[in-house]
């Protein structure tokens, strides 16, 4: 029997195209995400309340569009066409942000286009954000927001061409899995699951933790410049540092869970979150903020690991992903209202209180 060629065994052009598309779309998406609050504040010049509401509207639209597109994908058409549509929407969204800084247009048409575009980027933001946060802040600071959005546009155009010319057209089968584009399950958790005390406590604790995390992502670029007087590019450095440290944090969590158990790992992550947000209240120097990113990486990295571990039962995954969505929605409202009335500092005091509440609830969950 003739032995297969070494290269053909190990190199699959379709798989390589998938990886390249995932990486490029992750880079393009991550270019915009860290600087969105800064763009809305300095580029669009809206009040803090409207910045927070933009994030809330974006989260709500994302949930609705994901469900609608997932249902359509499960019943008709193939995924390549849907991914191509999402990439085209991403191109249009980037151009809209680059040339039409009108808040009403961005929060309606822009949010809708972003929601459609984001369904083509399942679980890949984390892949590219270790590179993108510093770059995403460097581009607008040195060349302006328009150049940054145009670079993102060009990246999504390349993704669209790769999708159109390299990915195979595979019609969806009738018997489908219960997963949205982007990894969000569409299973409905059984009603009796919510009646369990431990389930309720875990849901609320997870919701509070993701509220804290999202408030920080929204507010931090504005806080370090408006209140602390630090350079704007420091926000990108902090996000990039935390993203880079999350990878070893996830790997370490996977190793340690065998010895300490899932519950103890979660408690350790939430405690790290409490210390991280308390540190943001107490410290305001560049070196201290950099050092705190280790706690941030432990907090968020272990949460991502727990998300992966919860993927076995569909009901648990549904509750967990719903807690994330709810946390993002609340974060936009809380951050905008607090900054509007009390300033950026109040955001981190609230984050400390919510993280403490999440830690208390987590300790009351029984080990399994």
Image: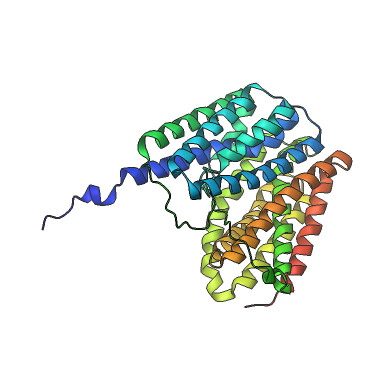
Q: Which colour scheme is used?
A: rainbow
Where, quadrant-wise, is the C terminus in this rendering? bottom right
Residue 365 pos. (x, y %): 71, 74
Seen from this angle, which residue lies furthest left? 1
Residue at screen point 67% across, 52% down: 325
Position of residue 239 relative to residue 206, above or below, is above
Q: Is residue 347 visible?
A: yes
Residue at screen point 47% across, 29% down: 157
Which of 198 and 190 lies nearest the eye of the viewer? Answer: 190
Choose top left, top right, bottom left or bottom right for residue 46: top right
Which of 298 and 17 lies nearest the eye of the viewer? Answer: 17
- How many marks overall? 0
Residue 302 pos. (x, y %): 60, 61
Residue at screen point 76% across, 37% down: 51
Residue at screen point 53% across, 36% down: 28
Seen from this angle, which residue lies furthest right? 341
Where, quadrant-wise, is the N terminus in this rendering? bottom left
Left or right, 272 with reference to 119: right
Position of residue 298 relative to residue 225, above or below, is below
Residue 329 pos. (x, y %): 73, 48
Residue 57 pos. (x, y %): 72, 41
Q: Is residue 295 visible?
A: no
């Amino acid at each position: 029997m003739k032995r297969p060629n070494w290269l053909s065994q190990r190199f699959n052009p379709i798989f390589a195209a998938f990886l390249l598309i995932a990486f490029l779309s992750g880079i393009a998406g991550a270019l915009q995400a860290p600087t969105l609050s800064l763009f809305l504040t300095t580029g669009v010049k809206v009040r803090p309340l409207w910045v927070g509401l933009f994030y809330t509207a974006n989260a709500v639209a994302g949930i609705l569009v994901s469900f609608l597109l997932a249902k359509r994908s499960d019943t008709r058409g193939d995924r390549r066409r849907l991914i191509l549509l999402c990439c085209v929407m991403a191109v249009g969204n980037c151009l809209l942000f680059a040339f039409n800084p009108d808040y009403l247009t961005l929060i309606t048409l822009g949010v809708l286009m972003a929601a459609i575009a984001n369904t083509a980027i399942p679980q890949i933001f984390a892949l590219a954000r270790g590179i993108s946060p510093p770059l995403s802040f460097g581009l607008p600071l040195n060349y302006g927001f328009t150049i940054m959005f145009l670079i993102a546009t060009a990246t999504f155009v390349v993704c669209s061409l790769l999708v159109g010319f390299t990915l195979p057209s595979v019609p969806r089968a009738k018997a489908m899995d219960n997963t949205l584009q982007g990894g969000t399950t569409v299973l409905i958790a059984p009603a009796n699951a919510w009646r369990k005390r431990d389930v309720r406590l875990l849901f609320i604790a997870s919701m509070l933790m993701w509220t804290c995390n999202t408030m920080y992502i929204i507010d931090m670029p504005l806080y370090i410049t408006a209140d602390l007087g630090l350079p704007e590019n420091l926000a990108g450095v902090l996000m990039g540092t935390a993203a880079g440290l999350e990878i070893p944090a996830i790997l370490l969590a996977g190793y340690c869970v065998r010895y300490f158990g899932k519950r103890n790992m979660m408690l350790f992550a939430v405690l790290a979150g409490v210390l991280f947000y308390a540190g943001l209240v107490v410290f305001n120097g560049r070196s201290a903020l950099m050092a705190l990113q280790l706690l941030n990486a432990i907090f968020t990295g272990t949460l991502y690991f727990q998300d992966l571990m919860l993927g076995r039962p569909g009901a648990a995954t549904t509750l967990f992903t719903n807690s994330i969505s709810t946390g993002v929605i609340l974060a936009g409202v809380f951050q905008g209202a607090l900054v509007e009335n009390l300033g950026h500092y109040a955001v981190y005091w609230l984050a400390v209180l919510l993280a403490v509440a999440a830690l208390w609830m987590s300790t009351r969950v029984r080990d399994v």
